[in-house]
Image (cartoon, helix red, strand yellow):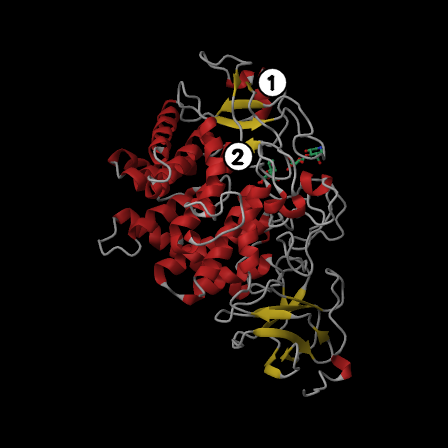
Amino acid sequence: MRTVPLLPAAMLSLFTASAQTGSPRLEYNQSGFLPSREKKAVLIGQTPEGRFQVTGAINGDTVLRGFCGPLLSSGNSSLKTRILDFSSLREPGDYVLAIPGLGLSGRFMVSPHAMEAEARAALKGYYHLRVSEALEERHAGKWHRPAGHPDTAVLIHPSAASGKRPAGTVIRSPGGWYDAGDYNKYIVNSGITVGTLLSAYEDFPAHFDTLRTGIPESGNPLPDLLDEVLQNLRWMLTMQDPHDGGVYHKCTNAAFDGMVMPGVTKLPRYVVMKSTAAALDFTAVTAQAARVFAGFRDRLPGLSDSCLTAARRAWDWAERNPSVIYNQDSLNRLHEPDIRTGTYGDGDIADEWFWAAAEMLATTGEKRFTERVVQGLSLPLRPASWKTVAMPGYYSLVRAGRGSSDAPSSEATVVRNRILRFADSLLANASRNAFGTPMGGSPSDFEWGGNSVAANQGIVLVNAYLLTRRTAYLDGALANLDHILGRNATGYGFLTGFGRRSPMHPHHRPSEADGIVEPVPGLLIGGPNPGRQDGCEYAFKEAETSYVDDVCSYASNEIAINWNAPMVYLLHAVRALSK
Ligand code: 9MR
Ligand code: 9MR
């Protein structure tokens, strides 16, 4: 065996693992690099011009030399950076980066398996959030636990009372996923979550058809992704009033539970007020589910048809009740008990109307939905979020035309051009950004759940790639994944359970209460949020640094189903498209 002096002694200091200190740091995707894709690391600090090299971690052979990029000033903090580009390294292996005079990175891998475990875990994350089901050790590992809230005797809250279901009526609304660090279930947030997961399946069916995550349903004839989606979809169907088609806004405690395990508290659960946003998001998702599950009629007879019936009835309710906005304060002025849990209240539902109409049109082809679709073509475009849902409607409108030789409809052409223009603006942001990412094009990208902004921007870019096959779009999507997994100002990889520096104290009740050191794995943390609405102690307060790994911090360190979904999409999309 050759003994190679690894590097001159002057280089041998490791870059400190502690983030947000003054000394130079090297940050990169801690979950590895795909051989065929771009590879970048970011040197943070006021550093002189210089060279870098990439060296085999085992044999010490230098495989690549380059220059650190020019000194950049971040628009989202006072940090200075240089970008190191080693994309031409394509040979799988374990490597370290060295910057003479400054230090050595930890080991990282270039491998076709990069981010594979992360992709599977992010989908499996939903299993850990299942509400009314015991998680067994053979599926949940050390995070096994008893069932949580049964939700078999849920009360109609006075705000939700109707002739056939007066206040206090007991209904069943079991199952589904816990929303986030809290133990409640919200239709609006379930809408964008299930919609995003179904889109992942519609865009990459072959990839998901063979993917197994080790859930109780693994091995049955349905893809695991759809088995998991069914958990929440079936719960959503219980939230529709069978008498009028309206959809309750949420199934909830009156106030947040304490930091205890699921099922410990036995406080009453309520379904609260029907809202138009809930009806429309429900319509969108059940219409999309009708389309997807039509391909599984033998396995799930009747499901697709029931979903479409539910979608039509919710749409009709919305047409009769076109602007019922969920406002918890006004609701509490009128009814007892007061409801103090998450609101997901959205005063502007033009985009919800559009999304529902777009999914209904994509599923049924019926002209009655066209008018609302045409109206939506001029909506302001933003990456998807729980309250901005035009984008998922756009995705469904172009999906139908991809790969078809028919002339696209005029609507599909408008939508295609709008997606591409938006994607171009994201790439332009990346070229100006101190971390080379579309994320952070504006400081306002760092909001409550900002990591999901990064992931949802990534989905826009994946869609642009699917429409054009231009690799710049795919590399832009990957850059945001790199951001989430470590190439960022905090140095954290934000998927629990992965990376050399990963959140240990998420605002997630089971992770806090289970007595296990490691948090429940596969959950995407919200990330830096200068709003700091939780009032916790933050050592750093700029847009891209205001993150604290403390259970106190629900504004920067919570997890949520609507954040995991675009992470699932992006991880699987980038991997599926890089084979
Ligand atoms: O745990 C709750 C979290 O899921 C929400 O995102 C957050 C904001 O609505 O509220 C958290 O609950 C806190 C409550 O708002 C105030 N009292 C302390 C609760 C737990 O930290
Ligand atoms: O993700 C939501 C964020 O956009 C809002 O600003 C915030 C305050 O209303 O609420 C977030 O959603 C929380 C929900 O209300 C309750 N469950 C936890 C969610 C994530 O923090």
Instruction: Provide the residue designation for mark 2.
Output: 176
Q: Can you tell which mark lies on residue 544?
A: none
Answer with the quarter of the image where residue 357 lies.
Answer: top left
Image quarter of the N terminus = bottom right
User: Residue drawn 43% across and 60% down?
Assistant: 424
Q: Is residue 227 visible?
A: yes
Which percent across, then down, holds residue 125? Answer: 57, 46
Q: Do the residues labelled 1 and 2 touch (CB within 8 Å)?
A: no
> In the picture shown, does residue 264 fall above or below 396?
above
Task: Say whether residue 72 is left or right of residue 565.
Answer: right
Mark closer to the observer (1, 2): 2
- Element under label 1? helix
Ligand 2 appears in which quadrant?
top right
Q: Nearer the viewer, residue 13 or 376?
A: 13
Instruction: Please report whichever mark, 1 or 2, sits nearer to the chain's N-terminal start.
Output: 2
Instruction: Provide the residue designation for mark 1.
Output: 333
Label 2 near ligand 2 (CB < 8 Å) = no
Label 1 near ligand 2 (CB < 8 Å) = no
- Element under label 2? loop
| Cα distance in 3D space between marks 1 and 2 | 30 Å
Image quarter of the C terminus = bottom left
Amino acid on which disc 2 is placed: Gly
